[in-house]
C-alpha cells in the first residue's frame, strides 16, 4: 500500500498529513520534538485568517487562495471565529488608513459610531476604521491540537525518529521549515516576536491591526480574555528569545490602541524565525521523491491548507499544483 512520510509536525506538516489521511492515504509523521510546541514558529502564530488584509502587501494569489483556509480549518475540528477583522490608524495618521484601503479589498469604512457599535471598548478612540467582514481567526495552538487529535483518531501519531524497519515511503513531504535549508539554500528566516497579555480592561471580538509608520502591530483575542500582540518582522534567522526593544515596540503601539493594556499581565513573550523564499510566496518544490512544503512566511495558518491540498492532489491524482516550483522540480 502506498505510504507517505511527513517530516515536521508544525502547521505545514500536520496540514499535509491531515489532507493525505482524509483521502485514505497511509501516512507517517516524524518530528524530533514529538509534535507542535514552543520550539516551532507555528506555536507563536497570530492565527488570523485574513486574506483581504494580506492583499495590502502580499502577492494577490495569497488573498485568492487563502480564502479557503477558514472552511478547511472548521471542517477539521478547529474553532474558527468568523467575526471579521479591523484596521485602525493612530490619530493624525489617517493617510495610512487610506493607503491600506487602496491596496486591499473586501472592506467597509466605519465611522466612529459604527466602530463603537462593533467594538465598544474602542469607542471614542478612532474616527474611522476599515472593517473586513469576511475574515476570521483561530487559536493556533488549539487548531494544531485539533489536527493532532484528528490524526490520532485515524491511527496517525507523531514519532520522534524514523523507524529503520518501516517500509520506504513512496514520497516524503518535507515540512521542516527553516530546518530544510540543508536542501533549500534560497530559504531565509524572518524573525517575529510576540506577547500574550491578560487582565486588561479591554475586550475585543476580532483581530485589530494598528497601523504605525515604524511598528505596525496586530492584537488578536484569545480564550479567557487574553490578547496576543504581534509581531515584529525582522530579516534574521536568529531563533533566540525576544528582545527588550521588540517588547517595547509592541507595547508602545498597543498602549496607543488602548491605555488599559498598561495594567495587563504579560503571560508569554516569545519569538521564532519564519521560513520564507525570496519572493515571500509559499510553494511546493520537488526533489526526486521528496516534496518540500515550505516558505509559508507570515501566512502559515492561511496558506498551509492550500499547500496541503495541492500536495495531496499531486501525489494521489497526478495534478500539477499551481504553487509548484517548476524550475526546481527535478
Image (tube, rainbow, N blue to C red):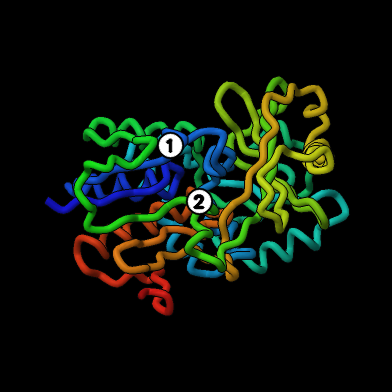
Q: In the shown orientation, is residue 291 left or right of residue 185?
A: left
Residue 205 vertical placement versus 232 (above, below): above
Using a 10 Å C-alpha cutoff, classify the residue at mark 2 as few (fewer than 14 neighbours), some (14 to 19) or many (20 or more): many
Mark 1, secondary structure of its residue? helix
Q: Quadrant of the C terminus?
A: bottom left
For the point 36% across and 62% down, the residue is 291
The residue where tag 1 is placed is 144
Residue 291 or residue 312, whichever sits in front:
291
Marks 1 and 2, Cα distance to the nearest angstrom? 12 Å
Q: Can the viewer see residue 262?
A: yes
Residue 276 or residue 49, whichever sits in front:
276
Where does the image place residue 47, in percent across and percent down from the top left? Answer: 54, 42
Identify the mark at residue 300; answer none if there is no mark.
2
For the point 66% across and 53% down, the residue is 237
For the point 78% across and 29% down, the residue is 261
Q: Residue 59 is drawn in which quadrant?
A: bottom right
Q: Earlier in the sequence, mark 1 or mark 2?
A: 1
Q: In the shown orientation, is residue 119 left or right of residue 28?
A: right
Where does the image place residue 75, in percent across and percent down from the top left? Answer: 32, 42
Residue 281 vertical placement versus 149 (above, below): below
Q: In the shown orientation, is residue 247 left or right of residue 76?
A: right
Mark 2, secondary structure of its residue? helix
Amino acid at each position: 500500500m502506498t505510504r507517505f512520510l511527513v517530516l515536521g509536525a508544525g502547521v505545514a506538516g500536520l496540514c499535509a498529513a491531515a489532507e493525505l489521511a482524509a483521502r485514505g492515504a497511509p501516512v507517517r509523521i516524524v518530528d524530533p520534538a514529538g509534535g507542535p510546541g514552543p520550539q516551532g514558529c507555528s506555536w507563536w502564530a497570530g492565527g488570523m485568517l485574513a486574506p483581504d488584509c494580506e492583499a495590502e502587501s502580499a502577492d494577490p494569489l495569497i488573498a485568492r487562495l487563502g480564502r479557503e483556509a477558514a472552511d478547511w480549518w472548521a471542517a477539521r475540528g478547529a474553532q474558527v471565529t468568523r467575526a471579521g477583522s479591523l484596521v485602525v490608524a493612530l490619530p493624525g495618521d489617517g493617510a495610512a488608513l487610506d493607503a491600506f484601503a487602496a491596496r486591499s479589498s473586501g472592506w467597509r469604512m466605519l465611522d466612529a459610531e459604527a466602530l463603537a457599535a462593533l467594538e465598544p471598548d474602542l469607542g471614542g478612540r478612532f474616527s474611522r476604521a476599515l472593517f473586513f467582514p469576511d475574515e476570521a481567526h483561530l487559536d493556533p495552538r488549539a487548531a494544531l491540537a485539533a489536527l493532532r487529535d484528528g490524526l490520532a483518531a485515524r491511527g496517525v501519531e507523531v514519532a520522534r525518529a524514523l523507524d529503520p524497519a518501516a517500509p520506504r515511503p513512496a514520497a516524503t513531504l518535507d515540512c521542516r521549515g527553516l530546518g530544510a535549508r540543508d536542501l533549500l539554500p534560497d530559504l531565509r528566516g524572518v524573525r517575529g516576536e510576540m506577547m500574550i497579555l491578560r487582565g486588561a480592561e479591554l475586550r475585543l471580538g476580532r483581530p485589530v491591526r494598528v497601523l504605525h509608520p515604524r511598528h505596525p502591530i496586530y492584537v488578536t483575542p484569545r480564550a479567557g480574555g487574553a490578547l496576543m500582540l504581534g509581531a515584529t518582522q525582522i530579516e534574521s534567522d536568529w531563533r533566540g528569545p525576544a528582545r527588550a526593544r521588540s517588547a517595547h515596540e509592541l507595547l508602545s503601539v498597543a498602549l496607543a490602541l488602548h491605555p488599559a493594556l498598561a495594567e495587563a499581565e504579560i503571560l508569554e513573550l516569545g519569538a521564532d524565525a519564519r521560513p520564507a523564499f525570496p519572493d515571500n510566496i509559499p510553494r511546493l518544490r520537488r526533489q526526486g521523491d521528496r516534496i518540500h512544503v515550505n516558505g509559508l512566511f507570515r501566512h502559515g495558518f492561511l496558506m498551509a491548507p492550500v499547500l496541503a491540498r495541492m500536495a495531496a492532489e499531486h501525489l494521489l491524482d497526478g495534478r500539477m499544483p499551481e504553487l509548484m516550483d517548476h524550475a526546481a522540480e527535478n
